[in-house]
Amino acid sequence: MDKIKGTFGRRVGKKKDNVSPAVIRRLPRYHRFLGELLKQDKLRISSSELSCLMGVTASQIRQDLNCFGEFGQQGYGYNIRYLHKKIGELLGVNREYNAVILGAGNLGKALISSHMFERRGVNRLAMFDINPEIIGKTVAGIPVYSMDDLPRFCAEHQVDIGVLTTPKDAAVAVAKTLAELGVPGIWNFSSNELSLEGTGTIVENVHMGDSLMLLTYRLKAEKDEADK
Amino acid sequence: MDKIKGTFGRRVGKKKDNVSPAVIRRLPRYHRFLGELLKQDKLRISSSELSCLMGVTASQIRQDLNCFGEFGQQGYGYNIRYLHKKIGELLGVNREYNAVILGAGNLGKALISSHMFERRGVNRLAMFDINPEIIGKTVAGIPVYSMDDLPRFCAEHQVDIGVLTTPKDAAVAVAKTLAELGVPGIWNFSSNELSLEGTGTIVENVHMGDSLMLLTYRLKAEKDEADK
DNA sequence: TAGATTGTTAATCGATTAACAATC
DNA sequence: TAGATTGTTAATCGATTAACAATC
């Protein structure tokens, strides 16, 4: 396996072509932990140290990180700043994607007021709603427009992400509109599953209710165990 | 393998003792789809029909549902109402768990105003915050108390679930308090990972930021693909 | 150099799919 | 009964862990 020396002597390993979905799903968590370590001014960490911290095996960490190239250094471990930056790049952080929020209800307001987006370099362009009482106002400094203005807005701006927080009944229609307008990504908070195959629009679903049910499952399972 | 006839002739199969985590994680999604079918007044569905709808293999559906007992009937398929009810029971839905929300900010308000809890038979008892401007008021009909009142409240009520929506810095301390007060479940929306091992308190984490990063990853991956 | 720790292969484990006998 | 569809076993596939040679 041939390896190339990078400009500053850092080894640049061959990237595997198809990284497994299981690894991808773990990357945000690595990114979070490395971000925490950075804040604590730690410079380096070994796979075994990180494995204790994260509650996974050191083997898995080395295997995971190796999918994308050689990020570590034998006898030293991993450079936290470098690794954090690289994983961020892999995940598409700080790409200046532009997002609009569809639905200026409680959830839409909560999301746009959080640091969720800016922390990942995603720009919040606007919100859209059908409620005349909120149209024309701003939330966390972001203007709220009428849903009717969505097509024009998308024509005039590069919109990469539509954050779908409308009530359930409206979600399917709004999603369809977004796909037709060529918005490439939908972050879907409605409990509807959207089928937009063939439109070229990617949907990432957030099912908070599923998470609550997994908690009630575990509470019940624990109780059943205790009752035995 | 011995099988027992239930009271109404329904076969009650042997339940497997340890159901795999992979199956558990899929149950809420089955529950959602079956709920939708119920609304459409469908009575029965075969594994192959459901597999088309959900985009998984019929084999997986049969394998999954069989972990818990025999829910189907050869030559007929699955009774939707029965299956929906059974999966709900497995997940601990409608157990009348009591929840309190810690943090009456945007996210706390959004969650308590949603039908998230009542839809799963989880009671919303109260919210807690440190902001004097909101303490004493109500949100969606639920009273907001001072965070200082949390211990007394927990002593006087059976609190099963603490929904953690406080800012990041406060989250660890509040979680610790909840564990000390004997609250068995925490639904954690703070991006901090909580380590409460040994306290007997279960934590279910919701990392919305991770989900957003998986979306930016997929947008980037798709673009890289197109650029090739 | 000696010690530490990665990168990587091989072994294990678990999850998914295919196939078909059982049975409604 | 004949047709349909599950329950269940066996085969495949993928993901995790263990081990150690490579190397900093």
Image (cartoon, coloured by chain):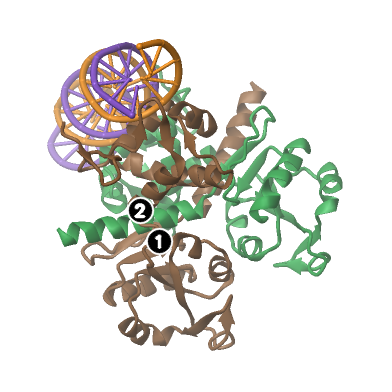
Chain colours: A brown, B green, C orange, D purple
Relative placement, left or right, of B142 versus B53 is right
Same subunit, tags 1 and 2: yes
- For the C terminus of chain A, which image quadrant? top right
Mark 1 highlights which residue? Answer: A94
Residue B13 location (% of width, % of height): 43, 26
Residue B123 location (% of width, % of height): 69, 52
Q: Residue at x 62, y 51 (%)?
A: B121
Residue type highlighted by circle 1: Asn
Tell me which numbered mark, 1 or 2, is placed earlier along the sequence.
2
State the count of labels.
2
Q: Above or below — where is B193 with respect to B42?
A: above
Q: Above or below — where is B14 with respect to A2?
A: above
Which class describes the residues within 10 Å of circle 2: few (<14), some (14-19), or many (20+)? some
State the residue in front, A29 or B58: A29
Q: Is residue B222 visible?
A: yes
Residue type highlighted by circle 2: Glu
Mark 2 highlights which residue? Answer: A89
The local secondary structure at tag 1 comes to loop
Structural distance between the alpha carbons of marks 1 and 2: 8 Å
